[in-house]
Structures are given as C-alpha cells and as structure tokens.
Image (tube, rainbow, N blue to C red):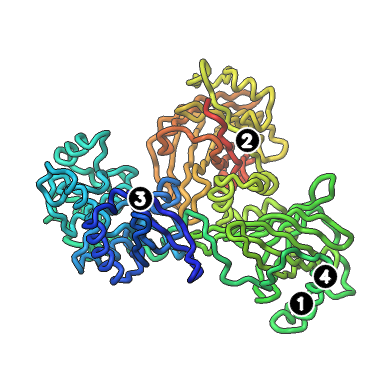
Amino acid sequence: MGVVYVAEDTSLGRRVALKVLSPDLVSSSAFEERFRREARIVASLNHPNIVQIHSLDNIDGRLVIDMTYVEGGSLADAEAMRRATLSQSLQSVGDALAGLASCHQVGIIHRDVKPSNILLGREGIALLSDFGLSKCLAAHHEAAVSSMASSCLFLGTPRYAPPESWEGKEPTPSWDVYSAGAVIYEAASGHAPHEANSPLELIRSIYENAVPPLSDINEAITPALSKAVAQMLAQNPNDRPQNASAALKLLSECPEFAEKKSARLSTIVQVKWPPKRAPFRLRLAKMKRPLVILAAAAFILAIASLLPLKSWFSSLPGEGARPRAASDHYVFNTTDTLTSERWAEHWLMIRGGEQQTWQVLASKGTDLIYLQASPNDESFDFLGHWAHYTDKTARAFRHGTVQGAGKWVRENELMTAVLQFECALDGSRWQGAFLLDRTVSDEPPGQFMAALESTGLFTRLVYCELIPRNLDWAEEVENLFIAKDIPKVTVPFLAGSDAPMQIDGQATETIWRQAAANAGPESGVLNAQSEGSGATLTVCRDKNQLYFYLASPTPLDNPALTLRLLTQCDAQPNQIISWKLVVDQSNAIQLHKVAGDKEYPQNSHAVAVSSGEAKGHRVEMAMPFTDLELEEGPLPDTRWRLSGAFADAQVEPVKAAVYWGRAAGASPVHGAILLFGPSE
C-alpha cells in the first residue's frame, strides 16, 4: 500500500511521518479525490486518539500524506516484544475506541482496526492510524476487478475482520467494534478468535466454530470482560454494540477497565526529547574538569548557607568531628543542589581491582547511573552511562553517556559531584551538581541491591531495556552489582542421549558428573549462600523440561526443598508472577502460582526422587516447562531468577540453614540468576 518515512518539517522544526502511497493507486484520479474527501473529514475531527493528517500532496505522481509522527511504536510491537500487559493493551484499545466513536458519529468507518494501526504516543496515549485508506482502497480494487459486483470488496486484515466482511456487505460501525473485540481477545488469550493457515480455513472456522469464552482460556479474566468481548465478537452485527461509543460503555463496566488510568503502556521505540528539567543546563562540548570541580564545590558550599539546605548541611558532623574510616564500599545519600531534592541511600560506590578504580551505581527507582570512578588525589574522574524511564509507568525509555568529576569535601564522608549527561538518541546535553553524604550504616552492597530490586523499576530497566538492546555496559551492571553477592550461572542444554534424563535420585548422568567435577558457573552449579553448608543445587534443561539436582551434606529427619522461580525478570514490580515448588521427603510435589501475597495451587507434572543417608541428602527432579505456562523452553540469553531453601519441613524457609538468594526465604526477585545458553 505504501511506505512510511520519518521526516523533519524544516519550516516548523518538528518531526513528521510521511506515508508515500504506491504509484498505481495515485494513477487513479478517482482514488485521490475520494481519499482527499475522507481525509478532510478525519482531519476536521482533531481527536487526541486519531493520528492527524497535516497535508496531502501529489509529488512526482505519488500521493504523500504528511501525518503526526507518533514515537512509541505500535501495540503490535509491544505485544510481540511481550512488553504489554493485559491492562495496558485494554487501555490502548479503549483509546482507539474513543477515536472511533468520534468518527462513527460522522459516518466514517475504519475497516482495518488492528494492533499495528494502534500507535503509542509519548504520554502513553494510543492513537488510531490509517483512517480512510481501507474504504478508498476497496473502491480502487473493485474498479480493477470486473467480476466483483459488490461495492464493498473485502479489504482489511483477515484475523480481525468480522464475518460480514467476507460476504461483501456494506460496512457499519459494528465492523470496527468486532475488530476491536478481536484485538482485546488476542491480547487476553494470546491468539486471535479464529486462526487458520489460509483464508478458506479462516472463513470455515468463522462460520462453523464458536469463539471460546475468554474466561475459559485465561482465569484472570473477569466474567464481565469475557461477556463484553463475546458481545463484540457476535457473528450477527445486530447482536454487537452498534458503534464504538456503545462498546466503550459496555467495557467501562468491566473491572479491568475501571483501573485503566494507571495502566498506560510504555513506549516501545526509544523516545527522543530532552528531560523536562535539566539542572544546570549548560550545552558544553567538553567538560573542563578543574574549572568545573572548583566552581561546583564553591557553588555547593555557597548554597549550603541558604534554605532549605542550610539546616540539613549544618546537621552534618563539624570540622572537629572524628573522621570516618575508609572502606571498600560507600553508600551515599544524594542531594540535587538546584532543587534540594534528596534521595536516601541512592549512590553505591564499590572499590574495584588492581587499578584502584571504583564502580558506581546510583538509582532512585526509575533510573540508573553506572560509572567508573578513577581516583586522582582527593577527587575522582567519572565516566559511564545512564538510562531512565520518564515515570513509574515505564512508558518512555532514554539512555546515553555521562562524564564528570567528584571531590571530597570531607574525606570518606562528604563529596561533591558534577555530571554531564548526553542523550544517545538526539545528542542533547545537560549537567547536574550533587552533594553526596555518606550514610551512617554503610549498608552492604547486597542490601542496597535488594532495596532496588524491591521498590523500583531498576530490574526492568536492566532486563527489559539494557540487555535486550545489547548495550555493551548492561552485563557489567549485572555482573558487578546484581550478581556481586548472588550466583549467576549458565543453564546447560542436554542433547542427544542425555535427554530426556532418567529421574532416579542417583544423579549418574554425564551432565551431573561433569557439573560435580567442574563446579563452575558454566556448569549450572549454584553453591548455597549459607556459609559452610557445602550444599549445591545444579540446574540443566532440555527442550521440554528443567532439571534440578540437590546435594547437601546435612542430614535431616524430615527434609523439604522449596524453590521459587521468576520467569520474567522484566515485569513491573506490581505485576510480578512467580512459581513456588515444594518437594517433601515422600517426593510429593506442590506447585503454586504466586501473585503478590497470594498463592494459587496448580497441577504439576514434575517428578522428584530423593534419597537420604547419614552423609547427607540428595534430590533429583524434572519439571516440564508447561508447568510454568510455557510452551517451550526459554530462548538463548533469557534470564530467570531462582531462590530456594533446604530445611526440615517444620522449619520456615526464612529460618533455613541452607538457602539460595540474597537471604533465607527471599523472593525470587532477589534470587540467583539463571542464564539460559544455546539450545543445541
């Protein structure tokens, strides 16, 4: 149909999207006139959920449509990359229906509502695109196909098209209602209402097979939403909500839509605009370190005499106070000297290797700064990277480089830092000046990381943005900070005669023997976090199953192994789903799906065999990926998190002497990192 380009409107200094239609379409003057007529009507609506058309031009025999550039990709992109939750998809469809409602009032029918035509704006608001094209294209094709008697040749996307579209009937607003229902159905179930390998099979399925209720496929769907979507997908157009306004009213009564205001979808394409506030916005080509340090130190100390920093600054130990001892790590509270914003336990600084460099990680939840800090007398040179979401909905992602300098105001206690940030997307630069005061407790790095994993979007930034984008510093953050106090192992893949494994409790397979001999991270061996326990948990997998082998030298009277798995490290904190698996002495297995503080019992096909003796205890287990609601094993480079405990069945996991994770009984959010290698 055409190609879309991102262009710059030099007269207004803005980005626009240019859709260039195929030459064979524009060769028809009737098509162009018809489309101009439709476009004028759509443009006159000026609705916030409709992609606006700025102008139409015929350039060198091609119709060029100048439209609003929508930066966030499409709903199809979000769902394909598994970044759209159901709530977020529902919000996007609701926005699209709002735009459709405005069009239906003036007699315009879209005819091709689908995820790729629902675009995601900067503020998380969805916009519907390609209005008018389907109707005009249908008329164009009809003129070219003399055997077609109908004035409404089918055109659209088959999997989202209603039954009447195949019969050549005149489209009505309920056509768009059906398509919107199909988009919701696919988002909630993972597949379209009808699926087939050919148009003929699809038509047969539409007329012969009823659409299964959503609540039968997804237990999380309320009966109200299941019923509403079923009405939108009714075969008879008269049984559906008759227009988008009626569909919106129906959906608004569903609990899932009652919470939609907090479910805006994050953008998928990286966004290119400067931050709303850039402290000390100085567009310098290069920082001049000595000048910046002296100026910053003088400025910060001058500000210390002003409110509201004055009372805080004066509360610090005075010049006569006993100096703080040096350490191999520091935790600082951070104060923005321009706004006086203060972030407790925000900045972690860890001493590095032989070069005496330090590594810095700073984060307040929605962002992170990663720096290499090189000492230079009483100061530091900083060089590194930054990334952040614009807000807690994670709707827009930005990243870039950062450099700067720091200077001790009071050694081992109080430091100034001046940082210059540069955006990798548009080259914009800004600076910030900060005052860092060392915390009283100097909490261990593991405790600092646990707080980040629990309360913010730090984990999502790393596993949903940095690592999937193959940014060269992403694994450094993972290895130096996340995996500093917990194991990170590669899960080996079983091939050939080793798969599937025989579960007999003896662990005689080659993979277990090799793991015992090498006992390294590449062998899938997780040493227990508890010191001196000598227990190991080894993990491997084949195409269909995950295998575990526990070896503990500690004999127990009534042993129980508890494992907790997080299979989506990129989930937002309030949307985390994990799995809890418990194996007792009789080899009975309990599996629970965990959402928040609630556990839901699940059927499990896992098999475990344990053996105990005076010298210790062994458990060998196989767990199908289908138990974890996965059709197949993880793709290469996928990360999972695992926590676990091995203790007497009467002992609570939080008191277990043998455990895996940041602490006994830890959530899998704080668990060891399982890195899945190549599946061959």
Residue highlighted by disc 1:
313
- Report the Cα–Cα distance between label 4 and label 1: 24 Å
Q: Tell me the kind of residue under disc 1.
A: Phe
Q: Are marks 2 and 3 in contact (CB under 8 Å)?
A: no
- Which comes sooner in the sequence, label 2 or label 3? 3
Q: From the top left corner, tell me how far across and down residue 430 is, in percent.
A: 66, 67
Residue, disc 3: 2
Circles 2 and 4, Cβ within 8 Å, touching? The answer is no
Is label 3 in contact with label 1 (beta carbons under 8 Å)? no
Between circles 3 and 1, the one closer to the viewer is 3
Q: Residues within 10 Å of mark 2 (few under 14, many from 20)?
A: many
Name of the residue lying farthest toward the bottom:
306
Is residue 447 something one can see in this rendering? yes
Dot 4 or dot 3, earlier in sequence: 3
Q: Give the CA separation, mark 3 to mark 1.
A: 62 Å
Q: Position of residue 69 (x, y in %)?
A: 43, 61
Question: In terms of sequence position, does the residue under pointer 3 or pointer 1 come before the other?
Answer: 3
The amino acid type, in three-letter code, at marker 3 is: Gly
The kind of residue on which mark 2 rests is Val
- Pointer 2 residue: 489
Nearer mark to the viewer, of 4 and 3: 3
**Label of residue 658 in the image:** none
CA distance for labels 2 and 1: 45 Å
* Residue located 61% across and 41% down the image: 672
* Above or below, 529 relative to 36: above
User: Which one is nearer the viewer's eye here, 54 or 548?
Assistant: 54
Q: Earlier in the sequence, mark 2 or mark 1?
A: 1
Mark 4 / mark 1, whichever is N-terminal = 4
